[in-house]
Image (cartoon, grey):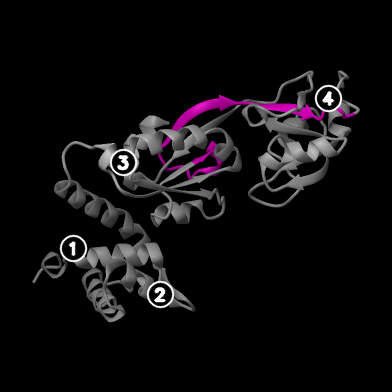
Amino acid sequence: MSKLDRLDLKQLRVFQALIREQNASKAANQLGLTQQAVSEHLKKLRDVFDDRLFLRKTNGFVPTPFAEDLSIGVDKLLNDFTALLSPTNFDPKTISGTFVIAATDYAQQVVLPSLISILRKQSPKLKLIVRDFELDKIHELMESGKVNLAIAFPDYIPDNYPIVKLFEEHHVCVASPNASIAHKNPSLTEIANYPSIIASPSRPNFKGSIDDWFKKFGLKRNVVVSAPCFSIVPMYLETTDSIAFLPSRAITGSKLIEINLEQSPDKFDVIAAWHPRYNDDALQKWVISLL
């Protein structure tokens, strides 16, 4: 009997669920099977592929390197089977299920409000989960199917992921109208020495995204406060005599004023990205087309 004859669709669905959940009990609940049935399917999969596929850990499983590579092909295969059984014409109004978007704090402010508005109007049965962008986990989350779409900056995304550029953005130097520097024309050296607040969503430290730009001029910023997100910085600025460099679209509607600079920081792209396995997924392509 060939390996193909020993393999069935249910086993591949069990494999996919174990990749996603990394826990036999959770996978069983997701598929409506008993934990024993999941174990039996896993045993057959190990025999077919001649690999342990999953190694036990304290609270579940961890996939082997072979299983991680295999998961991409299995997902594509199951998506192709689903497409065969689905209507030829994609209709957003009839689509149900859950779509998960991981977005930076900035993208949640600037990009998602209009996108969610369109999705709710055109696809009312689709449920949305918006989660914070976790730089250290994004590849794992997208590879396991726990995140469908990421909206962030190019440096945050694995090199082999498809991306689409949404728009170009730039940082502006801002302060409260009551700050002592607010109505002056300071030099870049004075800007560097002035107390500064940064947003560091990924890692709590005093390093900002434009530190390298200041280094070009032989300057180092006087960072005194590190905040976990962009949205809170304007409130901190209103209560302190300090400045911040924020993306221009993130200050829309605030009372902050922009401070003119001798030089402008480099521009950067805002992008959307997804795992290659979803390249041919109709829902994925539709959401990206809206972006």
> What span is in magenta?
151-179
Q: Regarding mark 4 in the picture, which secondary structure is present there?
A: helix
Which residue does the numbered mark 1 point to in the structure image? Answer: 9
Q: In x, y percent, where is residue 42? A: 27, 74
**The magenta stretch spans residue 81:** no
- Amino acid carrying label 4: it is Leu
Determine whether label 2 and label 3 are within 8 Å by CB.
no
- Amino acid carrying label 3: it is Leu
Q: Sequence-wise, which precedes: disc 2 or disc 3?
A: 2
Name which quarter of the figure residue 66 lies in: bottom left
Q: Regarding mark 1 in the picture, which secondary structure is present there?
A: helix
Which residue does the numbered mark 4 point to in the structure image? Answer: 188
Residue depicted at x 22% and y 75%? 44
Instruction: Specify whether 105 is left or right of 260.
Output: left
Give the numbered dot on residue 55: 2
Q: How far is disc 2 from disc 1 in space, using C-alphas?
A: 22 Å
Q: How far is disc 4 from disc 2 in space, using C-alphas?
A: 55 Å
Residue depicted at x 56% and y 50%? 135
